[in-house]
Image (cartoon, rainbow, N blue to C red):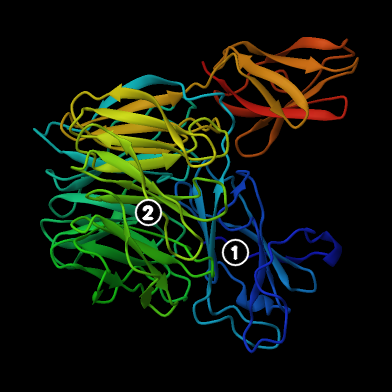
Amino acid sequence: MSPRRFSRAASGLVPAVLVGLVAPSAFAQLAVTGTIPASHSLAPVVTPIAVTFDRALDPATVTPATFRVFGRWSGPAQGTFALSNGDRTVTFTSSTPFSAGEPVFVNISHDVRGADTTPLRDAGWFFSFKTAVAPSGGIHFNEIDVMSNLGGDPQTRIYGAAACDLDNDGYLDLATVNETSADVRVTLNRADGSGLFEPFLPANPIGVEASPNEPADFDGDFEIDLCVAASLTEEMWILLGNGDGTFGSTTGIPVGSVPHGVAVLDADGDGDTDIVNANQVSGNLSLLLNDGTGTFAAPVYFDGGVSGEYGLTSGDLNEDGIEDLVVAGQAGQEIVTLLGNGDATFTPAASPSGTGGWTWVVALDDLNGDGHLDAACANSFSNHVSVLFGNGDGTFGSPQTYPTGAHTPAVDLGDLDGDGDADLIASSFGGGFWRFYENDGTGTFSFVQDVIAPSNPSCAIFFDSDNDLDLDLALSDEIADVLVLLENVGDPTTVIASGALTTQAPAPNPFRESTRLRVFLDTTTAPRLELVGVRGRRVAVHEYGVLGAGWRELEIPARDDRREALAPGVYFYRVSAGGRDASGRVVRVD
């Protein structure tokens, strides 16, 4: 753990716009009154996180243990804290960017206190946001590799994979979860901007028929850990990461009968991450409370509120700053929200909502842009997926169904075209394809294409594999035992307006010696372009002199300001002209 650094900023430096949550007043307990970013909103990959309270804070109680930030793919964030606004606002600045398109979770423990010693409520405070991806002008992918998961085994049966930075090099790796071989297998990103991966590391044995999984930092060491449900051996497996792609400890905890869905959340407000899983045959949920070291208490069982508990996820459905559960009932063809009370108990928000099918998986995102979390459901042998809009109170509207033609075990969400809304991929095991649907921004989806699988798909993993700020894909095929890697190439002819300066995508990209960026100048002006590495260090500045109005082509050479060759990798550019600017990314290869 890096040492905690703290500073105070002048009150005039606090951002002027905050999301109103609770009006400041003389509450008995310390209260959160606003957050930046807002809950369920989009933010850049480099963004400070500010939380404002109704009174001054005790700085000694704001620590990495009480104010935790976790990117679902980039992992636990380390950085600095600063107090401002009369010590009422704490701002966390991460030392590294988040990954494009990932959910980011913020948990504030009930151990935070005001300067007057008043504590935050027992439930603590939770909110989440997503990082934006670069616009790509459409859903366009190229296949760049098909990776075998077998490693000499006759079958592994990949059910899915976690995309996370397991070795702390700033690039996302893959950990496949395998039912038949009963293990987790890690392949590390080459970290060269290619989106390709190294050979698999030795397998990590776990329980039989392992499938749903979630990343977290269970032991507070700022390394990514994993939890996986194994249905045949009826266990929840905890794998504590070493930070180099390996795991130092793997522990199986007996839970209910035939566990499937998994959710990670702070159920009791103490700041660490607990686990809940759905037990299909037992017809209940298991809660495993974390003591902060990655050691979990014996499961506590409670009713899931549906028939045939199967799928499970979490989020703040009623927007009260406490994380809730959404449970999918396969037999009942329904989902229900269990509202978190913040004390390791949950209360149903209402009666279950029908999904229109035999739901195996439920995923959450704001699909229609109203600021509330919505649900997308994979309805297995009902041969479709369904979308239910959330009302902001834990309840859902009627389902809208989208056909998949055959048994569909998974649905996954992410912004594939960079237009600010989440698109959808349905994995059709029975049909032998991944079906892509594009969101029009209102939560209405249109068919784009089917990507034919080598055999039978299990799921789609969204992640930025090459650090170019768009979402790439790893598509898992559980019968062929391969990962199909797709690179998001966007539409190279698309005109992208960032701010007020209009540009076209650089070409070629990736490049070796140089690439060219087309810029439209409204008037005669002198463009300037800055090139920055993935860690935020400026490597080059290019001045192009005075150019006339119209489309102009700006060369970006593969040289830094010292005239030395740029190392292969991803670089971000910002071009300015006439008081306007645009930004994007380029990839330098050997």
Q: Residue furthest front?
A: 398
The residue labelled by disc 1 is 3
Question: Where residue 86 appears, x then y in whole percent?
Answer: 80, 74
Nearest the eye: 292 or 201: 292
Residue type (three-letter) at the residue carrying disc 1: Pro
* Res 264 quadrant in image: bottom left
State left or right for residue 403 relative to residue 221. left
Q: Is residue 335 above or below residue 468?
A: below
Res. 564 in view? no
Rendered position, 221 above or below 31: above
SS assignment at label 1: loop
The percent position of residue 481, horizontal first and vertical second, equals 19, 32
The number of numbered badges drawn on the structure is 2
The type of residue carrying mark 2 is Pro
**In the visual, does 469 lie left or right of 180?**
right
**Is residue 209 rendered to the left or right of residue 7?**
left
Q: Nearer the viewer, mark 2 or mark 1?
A: 2
Q: What residue is at 65 percent from the left and 49 percent from the top?
A: 47
* Residue 200 spot, x, y in % from top left: 27, 35
Residue at (53, 65) in percent of width and height: 319
Circle on res. 365: none
Secondary element type, mark 2: strand
* Residue occupying the point 37% across, 54% down: 215
Residue 539, above or below 364: above
Q: Which residue is mark 2?
A: 215
Marks 2 and 1 sit apart, C-alpha to C-alpha, by 24 Å
Kindly identify the residue that appears in the image at 66 percent across and 23 percent down: 496
Residue 513 occupies quadrant: top right
In terms of depth relative to the viewer, which is nearer, 236 or 416? 416
Answer above or below: position of 321 versus 519. below
Viewer-proximal residue among 413 and 562: 413
